[in-house]
Amino acid sequence: MNRKIFIVAIISLLIDQMSKIFVGIFLTFNQNISIIKNFFSIHLIQNYGAAWSLFNNKVDFLIIISIFALFIIYHYMYIFKLNKRNNLAFGFILGGIIGNLIDRVFLGYVRDFLSFKIFNYQYPIFNFADTFIVVGVFLLILATLKGEDKNENRN
């Protein structure tokens, strides 16, 4: 694995896990602290599914999907062109997947706590691992649009 991707993945994983531990020290589950009234709060929950409660209470299935996703991401790391953006993207995605996978394997749920209300819509509560995954996927979409999804220098 590319050393830069590995470093980004480790940093992302540490940010995710440390933030979950930190929030867990100060909040009990289902406790909510408003940071910006009617917009942003810290609300610690146990998520037994994926985004928008998909596959709720299917933890074993989500663990298998996460492991499968890690293999797919690992494969694509060797297909995409090596550059800063792609290193960041793959590191974010790997760190995010592993962060939520750790929660599912050891706790049976994912610790989510970032809660946003936007134009009276309560967005599903999420964590830093989710954020890293979304940003990483966005960066890979951008790389694909720029033609950086094939590395001619690799065999």
Image (spheres, rainbow, N blue to C red):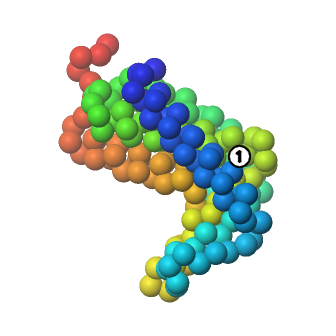
Quadrant occupied by the C terminus: top left
- Above or below, 38 against 69 in this view is below
Observer-nearest of 34 and 96: 34
Q: Residue at x 61, y 69 (%)?
A: 42
The amino acid marked with disc number 1 is Asp
Quadrant occupied by the N terminus: top left
Q: Residue at x 58, y 47 (%)?
A: 16
Q: Is residue 10 left or right of residue 44?
A: left
Give percent across and percent down for residue 86. 33, 35
Q: Is residue 135 left or right of residue 112?
A: left
Residue tagged by mark 1? 103
- Above or below, 69 against 142 in this view is above
Q: Is residue 50 left or right of residue 71?
A: right
Observer-nearest of 15 and 95: 15
- Above or below, 52 against 74 in this view is below
Q: Residue at x 41, y 47 (%)?
A: 137
Q: Which secondary structure lies at badge 1?
A: helix
Give percent across and percent down for residue 43. 65, 70
